[in-house]
Image: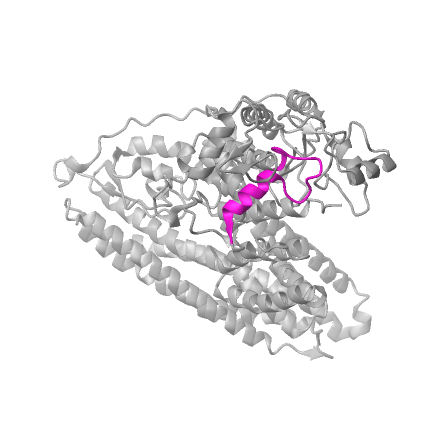
Amino acid sequence: MTEFFEKASKLSQQDPLPDNIIEMLDAYFEIIPEEEKDKFLWLYEGVELQLSQMKAP
Amino acid sequence: MAADDNYDGYLDKLADTHSKRLSDALEELEDRIAAALDDAPVKAGALFDLEWAVKARPELSKIMSETYLREATSILNDYSKVSVKALDMLNEYGDFTKTSPDIIKQLQSLTFKGFEDIATSHLDTIASEVYQNTLTGRTKTEMVKSVRQSVNGVYISSDSDAIEKLVSIAKNGSTSAAAAAVKELHSVYASDRVGGNMRRYATQMAQDSLMQFDASINTQMGKEAGIDTWKYYGDLIKDSRQFCRDHVGNVYTTAEIDEIWQGSWAGKSSSDGLIARGGYNCRHHFRPYISDVDGEAEEVKSKPKPKPETKNKLSDRTPQLIAKKDAIASLSKRTKAANKGTADRSVPDKYIALSSSNLPSHLQKTLDDKGLAGEQFPVRFRPYKYKRGDNVPKMGNKLFGTVNTEGMSTETLSILSQVLKETDGISAKFKAPPIRGVNPSKSKRASASMGDGMLSVSSTYWNPIAKSAYQSKDKLLADALKAEAKRDAAQKALTESGADVESKYDAFVAVRIKVGGRAARDTPEHKEFTEANVRYTLANKKMRKARDDLDKARKLSEPKIANTYIKGGNIEDRPWSSKEFYSEPADQFRSTMFHEYGHTVHQEYWRKVSDFDDTSFERYLSQLFYSNGKRSTERGLFFPTEYSEHNHKEWWAENFSLYNMGRTDLVDKKLKELMDEMVKSEGRIKIFDGWDFEKGEYS
């Protein structure tokens, strides 16, 4: 796992997630090697689950 | 140690040395190019001199020759030593004649051509970067940055975009994000210097060309000696392809090799199986085999009868391909049936409706005020296509029970419709509501996601994978070859276009000298030069697309190897995600959808209308997973994949997927007990491990 992947992974585990998490993931996605991209998509999956959850009224 | 094993070790070591030497040369190349670009003339800090930009190319070409190509030449000189070592090894088994120096020379020359092609391709891209940066009046620093990117990430056109994004975050993000981005920018550049795609392509070339050279001389010496049987040998490592695992240690005749290699490997890196071996990056070899003198005859495994490949044979794990409309009809029927609610929380497998008696009075009033009470469901997740300001409850409810399969191929839909049947079965087993809707992926990159029982599926991600479930290896390989031919054609067009720009520029400069700068702009030469530039930009774009397509096609044509990690094994061997435990594309899809359905279970099991932040189930998982705000390492929890360590919900979803894929051996002990209990119980379980799921607290 490259340093960038690891950093992105840690970032996506922060609670709460940074406001610009998707932008940050996009930036990391562009610079990680091709062979890590498939795995990286899971970070989007996990983040998507949290971002799409509504806040309590 | 056997002579061939010794030789195998020697080749592996040499391949690693060659890769390292080339990487070092690329470092030097990048530094020297950056230094050369420092001479670029600027006006008010901006690049402007197009003439300089065009003329920089010969200097760049010179640097390329003096660094990367010089090292490639030096590497090729080692090939003579390889031929001597190969002969020494073979003479342990028989009497072989040395390969003629002429043949070695020819092979070296052919290999050099490969290194040269990479250099030409990169030179075009670098020269283009220099020209484009000058044309758009960027700063020298920006140009050097983008060229550094081109050197080590030349195949990733968006690399500089990534940096731009980080810069933008540094400028406009929140304080903490901006600080993180500034820190990252430094690392981004440092990483690119270490190597990106050019290094990947060049070092792969170093490894593959050495192995192909070895294959060529071994084949030549064997054929010269009249030998027709060959032993496939070499070490098996974690990443060895299944194809190599199946054949390593075996002995085949030339005819058998032709037959076996025809299906999966012919043409992958050579049309000759003896040369192609296991394809790109393969470190296995053939050597001539003499049964009556070969000291290891008895060690050789009995020769398996090669099975002829059946074209388009579907795996047992792959559902029958069905018509798109039938798949959609089946999905619609299921999701419509699934979208049933109940106000009675003792009914486990239905979605809880807002008319529940458990609705807090303030929520009930809000619903009444908005006219949303009745058969509505509480919406906890942003619906597909949600935009800020949208009415989430209305929008969500409108989508529940519907299917939007936009972009999904027949293959994806065929597998999805079967998998939805299976998740319906799982939902009944686990007493949780089934999937009640399908839509395209909400996020631009997640392969799938889940919320409120609505499954999002990325067609961009799954269509090619699903397609590979229905195509023979031959077809996938043929597609990869076609993509390779397209890439080669695009490369040729780009090179020609580059030469055209140069000649048009020379003509334009000649006219400019004659008529002066201003008047030159109205000449046909200026027009032709401008048009040639546009053509070059288009050719460059086509080239990048062709290269990406080739990467994708190669990826699909390579055999998928299932991860073999087992509990108690080396943790380093664990896969990133549970889908890597399966080699079949349909199983990878299935595993991912089961993972997603696992999210529905923690989202809906004993869910109350008033649950927004976390359900009782999620709180149970959370207190199990975390200890003092960090992932617990003291409770003996098991994490079958790296992703399962991410958070409590992913831990559950990964384990849930494995459980339902029949890999209970990989499931965490506590979660397995919980899942067993959920399945065994007639209704929903109320108390497990002391946790009251209905109340959401320890009893």
Looking at the image, residue A27 sits to the left or right of residue B225; the answer is right
- Whether residue B100 is visible: no
Which of B221/B92 is in front?
A: B92
Q: Residue at x 60, y 77 (%)?
A: B38
Rendered view: B16 above or below B37:
above
Q: Residue at x 30, y 61 (%)?
A: B78
Q: Is residue B310 located in the magenta-colored stretch of the structure?
A: no
The percent coordinates of residue B101 (x first, y second) are: 27, 56
Residue B518 placement: quadrant: bottom right
Q: Is residue B615 located in the magenta-colored stretch of the structure?
A: yes
Q: Residue at x 35, y 58 (%)?
A: B16
- The quadrant of the rendering that contains the C terminus of chain B is top right
Which of A21/B538 is in front?
A: A21
Rendered view: B252 above or below A36:
above
Q: What residue span does the magenta drawing correspond to?
A: B603-627
Looking at the image, residue B62 sits to the left or right of residue B45; the answer is left
The percent coordinates of residue B12 (x first, y second) are: 30, 54
The percent coordinates of residue B509 (x first, y second) are: 71, 71
Which of B291/B610 is in front?
A: B610
The percent coordinates of residue B51 (x first, y second) are: 67, 72
Number of labels in the image equals: 0
Rendered view: B111 above or below B194:
above
Residue B13 placement: quadrant: bottom left
Q: How is the image coloured?
A: one colour
Rendered view: B137 above or below B122:
below
- Whether residue A39 is visible: yes
Looking at the image, residue B46 sits to the left or right of residue B190; the answer is right
Q: Residue furthest front?
A: B699
